[in-house]
Structure formats: C-alpha cells, structure tokens
Amino acid sequence: MTAPTQADGRLVDNILHFARALRKAGVRVGSGQVETAIQAVAATGFAERVDFYHTLRATLIMRATDLELYHQVFAMFWRDPEFLDAMMYMLSPELTDDAEPAKSPHADRRARDALGDGTAPKAEPKPREEIVEYAAFTWSDAEVLSTKDFEQMSNSELSEAHDALRHLTLPVKPLRTRRFRPGTTGQRPDARATLRAAMRRAGEIDQITRKAPLERAPDLVALCDISGSMASYSRVLLRYLHALAHARTRSWGKVHAFTFGTQLTNITRGLDLGDPDAALASVGTAAQDWEGGTQIGTAIETFNKAWSRRVLSRGAIVLLITDGLERGDLELLNREAARLRRSARHVIWLNPLLRWDGFEPRASGVKILYNQADKTCACHSLDSLKDLSMVLSKPISHTPDRA
C-alpha cells in the first residue's frame, strides 16, 4: 500500500468534516459509513463532480428521508468552487462541472445550521426607504419562537423549544375517590374516629370528628400518530410527553404513551428513561412504523381490546394526537372512537391542522373524531400547548355528538 499523498490527506479530512456536518444536520452517519465512503472515493476517483456526489450519497445515506438534507449540505459544504476544483484537480485533471441539485427551503435552513451558518446567504443590498418602528410593538425572539410552527423550526430553534417544553405546566383537576381522609372541613362525620377519641375520655364525646373525600391525580394516556404527515410534530410532542413523565411537581399520575401508524406500539417504558435523547432513541427502536401509513381505527381498536382496561380504569385522560386523516374503515373508526370516549374520563384531540383559521372538519375521519372528542386543541407550537393547559384546567363535560 502506498503512502497517502498530501492531496489524499486533504480529501480524507474534508470527507470527515462533511460527515460531521451531516450528523449535525440530523443525518445518521456512522464511522463505518465514513470509512466506506473514503474507500469508495479512493476506488472510483474523480471523473466528474456528479460521480463524487453520488459516491458519497451511496455510502453515507441510508434513509430516503435524508436525501433532501444531503443535497443541501453537499451543495453548501462544497460550495467554494475554487477550493473544490483545486482539490479535485490534484487528483484528476479531467474534471467537468455539474449543476447543483434543486434546493428546499426547510432542508436549506437545517443545512446552514449544521455548517455553522444560521442565516440566509447575504444578497447585494438594495436601496430602500428606511422605516423607524416603535420598539414597544416589536416581538422578542422568545415570543416569535412560542408562536412558530414546529415544522418550520431550524435545529437551533427546535433545541430551544425542547428546553421550553420542560417548563410547561399541565394543571389537571384531581379526581375525588370513594376513600376518605380526616379533615376539619369535611361534611361527613367519622364515627370510628369519634368513638376512638371518646374511649380516651371515659366515653365522653368531646367533638365529632369529620372526614373529607380523598383526591388523587388522574393518569394521562397519549395515543400519538407517527405517520408521514405527523412525523415532525410527533417528535416534539414525544419530548413533551417525556417532560410530563419526569416533571418534579405535577398534578397528574402515571403517563402512558402509545404510538401508532400501521400498528400500535406501547412506548411507556422507553419514556421512563431519564435522558430525553436516550428515551427518544428507545422509542424510535420500539416503533417500527415511523413515517409510514396510518390506520387510526385499527390502532384505537387494538388499544381498546388490549390496553383500555389496564390504563383507563383509574379515570385517565386520553390525549389523541393525530390529524385525523383516516384511510381505513370509517365505520370501525367511529365505533372504536366512541368506545374510547366511554372508557376514558375525557378525550382531548390534539390536531396540528387546527393552526389554520379556516379549518373545518370536512374529511370523514376528521369529522368522526371531532364528534367523539370532548375537546379539540392545536399542537403545532409552544403557545398551542399552553392552550392545552388552559383546557385541562377548566371543567370538561361530555357533550352530545356534534354535527
């Protein structure tokens, strides 16, 4: 084996830096893939820029969902034509150029964040009239972040949103049980405690002891849609559920979580892990139907048959997280959603489509869930999750089916 040349060293270093940029953008790239990429580039050499592009793509990208990010990171990492041409010229004099792939705005922003450039490329300034605004009416970064859609956030903004989720409260009203506790404000006399106190006074009753109903926090049960249309929101909401499960002071009991796309998966044990990244990694391993199709009716039916009696017997509140775009049996969805509503204390439907002001339940699946849910709430931003807290802090009653 010949010793690596200076040009080879520069190429290896830049491939390593490129792999780190992909990781920072959210693409899963292992050290074995990087080693394979270096060997593949050494074997194929440079004939055209497009060959270099496809060689790295074939060795570094394992999921189709990462292709758009790869396009943007590649275009930005190697966007200095003089550097790239000089480096490739040292390895092959027969280099021809090729056009860059088409850009997507969301992937473009995430690629800039990964490469340490969170701002858009600077264009030539155009002469314009300067407008002076009163600072009292401008928004702060925190205010903009709280109203921004999760799907439109960059990596750094998502990180800030994850930190903010840990501080959101969820005031759930406690449940009154059949058991009692001693209480001076209780309306019911405690005969046993009164007689015990009288025995210590030779049978003389000094005062009547009273007792009040014992209250306990209800459990939370989340059914989270992880199909393709809900994937970006589900990842953030699973972080939210993890924060609820590990909150130090809370007004709710146990948090049970399930994901569904083409099948129902219990992820409660994964969310029990203390580290949120480890918890989400465990959830990703357990749920094998990420970003696939969705069968809401079938998933709710499986939950009703296998898990309903286990997790809803203590008056739990169900958070149904889905856009309601059912492609399966609508009669099954209506029947099982009605059964879920009868079994749970309350069913709160979290739908990211409610972010649109003109939203109407026109699709059949959406209309069914709208009729069966006790309350509906958006879940596309931090402010919408704060609205969920307001919904749960107020009395909720079952209402008749809405037309």
Image: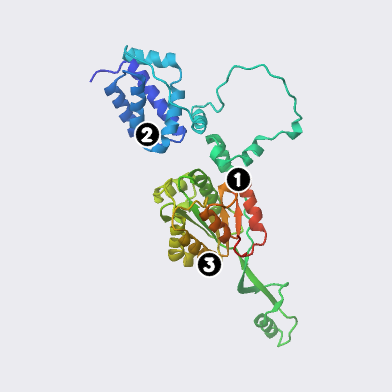
Going by the picture, which residue comes out furthest to the left?
1
12 relative position to 116: left or right: left
Kindly check if marks 1 and 2 are in contact, taking CB atoms under 8 A apart as contact: no
* Residue at the spot 58% in from the left edge and 41% down from the top edge: 149
42 relative position to 76: left or right: left
> Which mark, residue 242?
none
Q: Residues within 10 Å of mark 1 (few under 14, many from 20)?
A: some
- Mark 1 or mark 2: whose residue is earlier in sequence: 2
Dot 3 amino acid type: Ser
56 relative position to 154: left or right: left
The percent coordinates of residue 343 (x first, y second) are: 53, 67
Name the element at disc 2: loop
* Residue at the spot 55% in from the left edge and 56% down from the top edge: 367
- Mark 3 or mark 2: whose residue is earlier in sequence: 2
The percent coordinates of residue 205 (x first, y second) are: 73, 84
Spatial CA distance of label 1 from label 3 is 29 Å
Spatial CA distance of label 1 from label 2 is 33 Å
Name the element at disc 1: helix
* Residue at the spot 38% in from the left edge and 22% down from the top edge: 13
Circle 3 residue: 343
Q: Residues within 10 Å of mark 3 (few under 14, many from 20)?
A: some
Of 41 and 300, the residue lying toward us: 300
Dot 1 amino acid type: Arg
Q: Is residue 314 above or below residue 358?
A: below
> Which mark, residue 61?
2
Q: Is residue 285 above or below residue 65?
A: below
